[in-house]
Image (tube, rainbow, N blue to C red):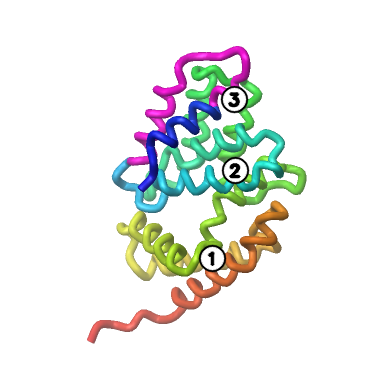
C-alpha cells in the first residue's frame, strides 16, 4: 500500500526544489490533485504503487540525470492521465503538465522539459545524450527486472487494466510489445540499469513471451 502522506511530502519537496527562490502557490493542492488521479478505479498497474516505485528508482539513478527534480516531476505526470482504452494518455498527461506547472510556479523552460520527458515515455527511446530521458525511461521500465513473483503480479495487473480486450487479442498485442522491446539493442540506457536490470528484464520478458506464444488449452 502506497504511503500518500510520504508521496505528498515528496511532491512538495520536488516542486519547491524546481521552482527555486521565486516561490509560488501552495504545492499541496497540486499534490492532492495528482494523488487523486493516480488512485482512479480503472488503474490496476498504473497506481500509486507504480508511481512510488518509479520515484524510488529515480533516487537510485539520480547521479546520471542533469536535473533529477525535473525527472521526478515528469514521473508524477507521466501517467497522470490514464484510460486503458485510449491511446493518447502520454500526450494528454504532457498537456496536463503544461497547464498545471506554470500555474504552480515552474518556469516555462522546466515545464517544457517535464512535458518532453512525459512524451518520451511513448517510445522509451531516449537519445544517447539525453541523460534525463534515460533516467526516466530506465526508472519506468525497471519493473521488467522484478523478481519472479513481482513480475507475475505486474503482468496480472496489466491484464486486469485491459480486461475489456478479448484474451486472444490481448495475447497477440502483449506479445508484439515484448518482441519490440526484446529487439532493442539495450532496454536500459544508464550504466546502473544496464548492469543491474538488463539481463533479468530480458529473462522475464522471454519467459512471458513463451507463455503467451503457447496455445491456450481449452477447458475440458
Q: Nearer the viewer, residue 14 or 212?
A: 14
User: Does residue 21 show up magenta in the picture?
Assistant: yes
Q: Tell me the SS state at disc 2.
A: helix
**Residues at marks 3 and 2, CA–CA distance in whole angstroms:** 15 Å
Task: Give the x, y percent position of residue 67.
Answer: 67, 34
What residue is shown at x 32% (from left), y 41% (from top)? 40
Which residue does the numbered mark 2 point to in the structure image?
59
Instruction: Judge the density around disc 2: few (<14), some (14-19), many (≥20) Cα neighbours within 10 Å.
Output: some
Q: Which residues are magenta?
A: 15-39
Residue 74 % position (x, y): 55, 36
Tag shown at residue 17: 3
Disc 3 or 2, which lies upstream in sequence? Answer: 3
Q: Is disc 3 placed on a helix, strand or loop?
A: helix
Residue drawn at x 40%, y 62% is 153
Q: Main secondary structure of the magenta part?
A: helix
- Residue 183: quarter of image: bottom right
* CA gap, disc 1 and disc 3: 37 Å
Q: In the current view of this chain or complex, which residue is farthest to the bottom?
A: 220
Q: Quadrant of residue 160?
A: bottom left
Q: Which residue is mark 1?
A: 178
Q: Nearer the viewer, residue 26 or 204?
A: 26
Q: Residue furthest right?
A: 129
Q: Residue at x 57, y 48 (%)?
A: 57
Image quarter (top left, top right, bottom left or bottom right) of the C terminus: bottom left
Above or below: residue 214 compared with residue 57: below
Q: Is residue 211 above or below residue 136?
A: below
Tell me the mark number nearer the camera, choosing from 1 and 3: 3
Marks 1 and 2, the one that precedes in the sequence: 2
Give how far across and how far down residue 66 sits, in percent.
71, 36
Amino acid at each position: 500500500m502506497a504511503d500518500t502522506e510520504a508521496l505528498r511530502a515528496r511532491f512538495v519537496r520536488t516542486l519547491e526544489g524546481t521552482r527555486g527562490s521565486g516561490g509560488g502557490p501552495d504545492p499541496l493542492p497540486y499534490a492532492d490533485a495528482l494523488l487523486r488521479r493516480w488512485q482512479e478505479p480503472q488503474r490496476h498497474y498504473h497506481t500509486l504503487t507504480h508511481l512510488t516505485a518509479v520515484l524510488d528508482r529515480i533516487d537510485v539513478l539520480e547521479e546520471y540525470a542533469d536535473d533529477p527534480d525535473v525527472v521526478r516531476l515528469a514521473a508524477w505526470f507521466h501517467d497522470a492521465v490514464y484510460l486503458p482504452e485510449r491511446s493518447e494518455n502520454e500526450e494528454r498527461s504532457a498537456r496536463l503538465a503544461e497547464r498545471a506547472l506554470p500555474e504552480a510556479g515552474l518556469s516555462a523552460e522546466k515545464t517544457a522539459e517535464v512535458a518532453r520527458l512525459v512524451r518520451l515515455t511513448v517510445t522509451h527511446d531516449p537519445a544517447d545524450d539525453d541523460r534525463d530521458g534515460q533516467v526516466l525511461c530506465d526508472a519506468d521500465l525497471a519493473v521488467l527486472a522484478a523478481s519472479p513473483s513481482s513480475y507475475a503480479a505486474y503482468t496480472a495487473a496489466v491484464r486486469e487494466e485491459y480486461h475489456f480486450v478479448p484474451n486472444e487479442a490481448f495475447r497477440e498485442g502483449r506479445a508484439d510489445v515484448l518482441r519490440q522491446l526484446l529487439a532493442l539493442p539495450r532496454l536500459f540506457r544508464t550504466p546502473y540499469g544496464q548492469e543491474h536490470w538488463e539481463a533479468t528484464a530480458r529473462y522475464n520478458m522471454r519467459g512471458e513471451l513463451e507463455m503467451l506464444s503457447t496455445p491456450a488449452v481449452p477447458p475440458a
